Amino acid sequence: MFEIFRKERLAEGVCRMEVHAPLAARHARAGQFVILRVEEGGERIPLTISAADRARGTISLVFQTVGATTSSLARKACGDKLKGVVGPLGVPTDIRGVHRAIVAGGGVGCAIALPVARELHEAGAEVVSVIGFREKSLVILEEDFAACSDRVIVTTDDGSYGECGNVTAPLSRLLREDFDAVYVIGPLPMMKAVAEATRPYGVKTIASMNPIMIDGTGMCGCCRVRVGGEVKFACVDGPDFDAHLVDFDEIMQRNRTYSDFEAREREKDCRLLRGGNL
């Protein structure tokens, strides 16, 4: 069993948990994830490792309560135990030869972007982090990014904090400079927009994909992604791929497959919290 050592609320519906998982902590690299089960017989979900403390044997996981399993996870408290944490899985983010990089994160995707920025910084690269949110109340991890970035630019869709708009506006300005790579993690439409913004400049752009995933070993095929016309599996070939080659439209359509089911499960959770009947 995997004990929850620490839990904190980062924003409405967004939590960070520090979980005791010594094997995962020992080997974790930026870009990798774990497959987690909250309860016996429960759904297995992928969560990216936001940080790892090898000395304490813990990993940090940031998640948003968007479905049945994340809602169940959010109800856990410090001292509670999770049924399963398997990992690290996936191919670590490749930062070789990168001396100047832009790391772009959107929403909760910033939790995935953070370890990439941190690893680049620790390798001596110049890092400019551009993080975007819908509004000020949803801004997370700004101080964490500041600790491992040479510059941090925050945007909000409504202009309530930082620059008004999404991450592509400051990105377009930054691309006039000379960067070796852009790493983007966030909602699929945002990553697609960033890929289109960087394409004319020919700068290497890496997207971390988050398709539906079950086993994390390439067996189920649910996490398939079409990259340059070839089928890849995010769990074993990724989750990082060349953003200029990813078929974002196909993966967005597939990710909507269970949207009705998740909506029903969220409504059940709301009824439970209100003390109503299912």
Image (cartoon, rainbow, N blue to C red):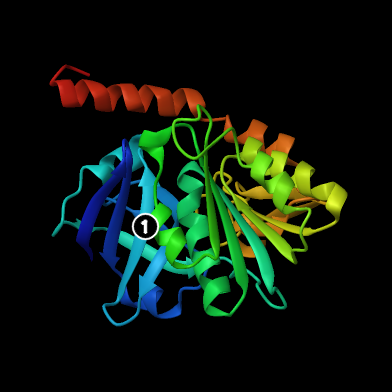
Q: Residue at x 40, y 60 (%)?
A: 144
Looking at the picture, tell me which residue is in the foreground, 115 or 92. Answer: 115
Q: Residue at x 56, y 45 (%)?
A: 186
Query: Horizontal placement of 275 versus 248: left or right?
Result: left
Q: Quadrant of residue 193?
A: top right
Residue 9: horizontal and vertical position, in percent?
26, 46
Q: Count the labels in the image.
A: 1
> Does the rendering let one see residue 53?
yes
Question: Is label 1 in a helix, a strand or a loop?
Answer: strand
Quadrant for the C terminus, please.
Answer: top left
Q: Residue at x 43, y 66 (%)?
A: 147
- Which residue is the site of mark 1? 61
Q: Amino acid at mark 1?
A: Leu
Quadrant for the N terminus, please.
Answer: bottom left
Q: Residue at x 57, y 30 (%)?
A: 257
Residue 106: horizontal and vertical position, in percent?
54, 44
Q: Quadrant of residue 59?
A: bottom left
